[in-house]
């Protein structure tokens, strides 16, 4: 999932992203690999986190390239 990579490029670690979203680092890694899609709350938090870091996420950023 490109969404996590785009957020990570703003300087945040996996742990910092997880803390901001309110989930585990394991969940973030699963999102990033396309093994899991965030639930509605985490999806919204990821969008808000990205927005707060100056990143606009498109729907395409949440689609796994492996799919």
Image (cartoon, rainbow, N blue to C red):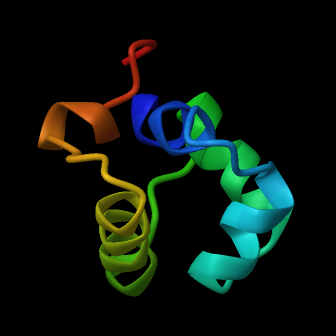
Quadrant containing the C terminus in the rendered view: top left
Tell which of 50 and 62 is nearer to you.
50
Q: Position of residue 26 (x, y in %)?
A: 83, 57
36 vs 2, left or right, is right
The image quarter containing residue 23 is bottom right
Q: How many numbered marks appear?
A: 0
Q: Position of residue 34 (x, y in %)?
A: 53, 34
Q: Residue at x 46, y 64 (%)?
A: 38
Q: Position of residue 33 (x, y in %)?
A: 63, 30
27 vs 26, left or right, is left
| Whether residue 50 is situated above or below residue 2 in the rendered picture | below
Tell which of 28 and 54 is nearer to you.
54
| Whether residue 19 is situated above or below residue 65 in the rendered picture | below
11 vs 4, left or right, is right
| Whether residue 47 is situated above or below residue 20 in the rendered picture | above
Q: Position of residue 19 (x, y in %)?
A: 74, 79
Q: Residue at x 37, y 69 (%)?
A: 52
Q: Residue at x 46, y 34 (%)?
A: 6
State whether residue 3 appears in this view: yes
The image quarter containing residue 35 is top right
Q: Residue at x 67, y 63 (%)?
A: 17
State whether residue 35 appears in this view: no
């Amino acid at each position: 999932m490109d969404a996590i990579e785009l957020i990570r490029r703003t300087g945040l670690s996996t742990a910092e992203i997880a803390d901001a979203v309110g989930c585990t680092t394991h969940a973030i890694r699963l999102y990033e690999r396309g093994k899991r899609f965030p639930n509605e709350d985490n999806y919204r938090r990821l969008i808000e986190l990205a927005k707060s870091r100056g990143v606009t996420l498109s729907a395409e950023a949440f689609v796994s390239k492996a799919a």
